[in-house]
Amino acid sequence: MDWIWAGVQSIRNVFSIDSGYRLTDDQVINHFPNHVELTRKDLMKDENGRFIHLDFIPLTFMLPADYNLFVEEFRKNPNTTWIMKPCGKARGIGIFLVNKLSQLKKWSRDSKTNNFTPPTSKDTYVISKYIDNPLLIGGKKFDLRLYVLVTSFRPLKCYMYRLGFARFCTVKYNASVNELDNMFVHLTNVSIQKQGEDYNAVHGGKWTVQNMRLFLEGTRGKEVTDKLFDEINWQTVHSLKAVSGNISNDRHCFECYGYDYIVDDNLKPWLIEVNASPSLTSTTSSDRIMKYRLMNDLINIVIPLVRCLSDVRWNKIPQKEHLGYFDLLFDEELAQQDALNMDKKLGPGGMVRGRKDGSRPSPATWK
């Protein structure tokens, strides 16, 4: 059996028609052909903007294509801060904050019409409303990096890794306009924070998700903490469902995504970014151990599935001992069967106990 772990450019070459290469039954590869439908910042906005209930992504525009729409929104709320990110880049490269239209002149000059500018353009940016009321711990901003394994988009089958982590800024948060250019205050990317004089190489400015939960349970209560993480799970599933119809669902493919969330001071999570190639570089000893376990558990799930590629057993849920620190997040086949069984039990008009009509589904319906 061939296990192929490659970068995104290599994946494009593998799936290119001109390459003449075809995967055999015993080969598996770590990206779906058009994973950019989910991970490109501009495409994520387009696809998710058309999906119901995705109220967990900050208001976003693509520049220069959406410049006029952005100006209209900006004038409604002139005191709002926005964050600009170049499409197709990672690790905080090229990101900056703006609070004045004059700061966008060089992008508006490039767009003389409202016509769509191809997202491959090096000058294409997304601009999103900045979450200026982040939840602070020790006065510092943080975000959550969570790992999600997808083994199929149709039917959707995905797993959430329990050993994610929180990344902290090294400088205490300050919403003052005088600090807009201070990336050590606003950006949690380790590649940026490690350049600061306050960076601690021992812990790397990270907490485990388990420690984060314990802290929130102690300061905010267990009920609201559980609700926060249930909401994160719900958002993750629906972001995947939003693009499932557009992804080329190849049996030879799986993907480990890095989901980045920011939590505001109302304990509302916001999906900021999805990464197709989350960094496996270790910055601390605990980081190295966590990422080793991530890869080990991922292999234990994916490899048994490969052995069944030409079999009706393909993509069945692995045995519990093979899941490691992964939890089954959503299985569309099981969800459909559960819905069918519930309809049979309650009738078409029945509801899950404890759920109000029109509310979001309880965790039992999507885990």
Image (tube, grey):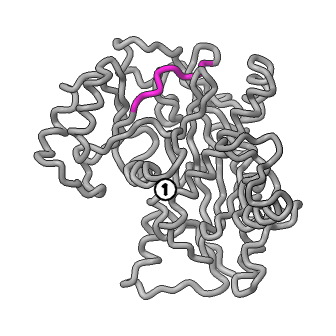
Q: Is residue 360 left or right of residue 328?
A: left
- Is 188 in the magenta? no
Residue 64 is situated, as x and y percent measured from the top left of the image, at 22, 44
Q: Is residue 92 left or right of residue 145?
A: left
The residue under label 1 is 38
Residue found 60% across the figure and 66% down from its top? 153
Q: Residues within 10 Å of mark 1 (few under 14, many from 20)?
A: many
Residue 322 is situated, as x and y percent measured from the top left of the image, at 84, 63
Quadrant of the frame with the N terminus: bottom right
**Front-most of 58 and 95?**
58
Residue 149 is situated, as x and y percent measured from the top left of the image, at 66, 58
Q: Main secondary structure of the magenta part?
A: loop
User: Quick check: can you spot residue 201?
Assistant: yes
Query: In the rendered picture of this protein, how many numbered marks are placed on residues?
Result: 1
**Front-most of 367 and 360?**
360
**Which residues are the magenta region?**
129-136
Residue found 63% across the figure and 52% down from its top? 237
Which amino acid lies under the numbered mark 1 shown in the image of this protein?
A: Leu
Residue 97 is situated, as x and y percent measured from the top left of the image, at 35, 27
Vertical relation: 277 (above or below) 17: above
> In the figure, residue 251 lies in which quadrant?
bottom right
Q: Secondary structure at mark 1?
A: helix
**Front-most of 16 and 262?**
262
User: Quick check: can you spot residue 289?
Assistant: no
Residue found 51% across the figure and 60% down from its top? 243
**Front-most of 145 and 204?**
145
> In the figure, residue 346 lies in which quadrant?
bottom right
Vertical relation: 156 (above or below) 271: below
Residue found 66% across the figure and 46% down from its top? 234
